[in-house]
Image (cartoon, grey):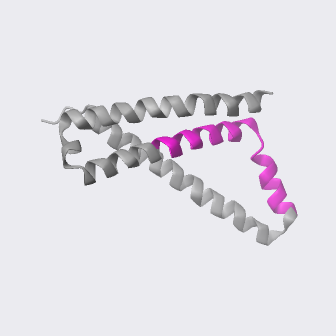
Amino acid sequence: MYRGGQGMWAWILHRVTGVGVMIFIVIHILDTWLIGFGPEVYDTVMNIYRHPIFRLGEVALVGALLFHALNGLRVILIDFWPEAGLFQKQRQLFQVVVVLFFILYVPMAGYMIWDIIY
């Protein structure tokens, strides 16, 4: 019986971040499409995106992109390096992804949130 672990969390987070990025891309395509209705419509939507809630969404988007990219590199390593498929190596690789994510994301998110607050 499968009991989860790092592999399960890596799989779930990779799917969730992938869906989040896909939703952003669809919204981005739609709001760019609005330019066809005139600059006033486009500017109105862009002003909505300046609201702090949307700005926090940008912080979440950066986190989703970063995790998805780092975990994607982990998946590539597992695919092309046969020894990486071993359970212990997968655990270590996922731990490296998590550590790199926090090292890169925390300062970046702090800077972005600081910009929202002030």
For residue 40, above or below residue 7:
below
Q: Is residue 87 magenta?
A: no
Quarter containing the C terminus: top right
Q: Is residue 44 magenta?
A: yes
Taking the spot 58% from the left edge, 58% from the top edge, the residue there is 25
Specify whether 118 is left or right of 89: right
Camera-side residue of 59 and 76: 76
Specify whether 62 is left or right of 82: right
Residue 53: where, in percent of width, then height?
Answer: 70, 37
Residue 45: where, in percent of width, then height?
Answer: 78, 54
Camera-side residue of 60 and 66: 66
- Residue 116 occupies quadrant: top right
Specify whether 62 is left or right of 68: right
Residue 72: where, in percent of width, then height?
Answer: 39, 49
Q: Residue furthest right?
A: 40
For residue 95, above or below residue 10:
above
Q: What are the residue bounds of the magenta stretch?
A: 40-67
Q: Residue furthest left?
A: 1
For residue 26, above or below residue 54:
below
Principal secondary structure, stretch drawn in magenta: helix
For residue 20, above or below residue 53:
below
Taking the spot 78% from the left edge, 52% from the top edge, the residue there is 46
Residue 54: where, in percent of width, then height?
Answer: 69, 41
Camera-side residue of 37 and 63: 63
Camera-side residue of 82 and 8: 82
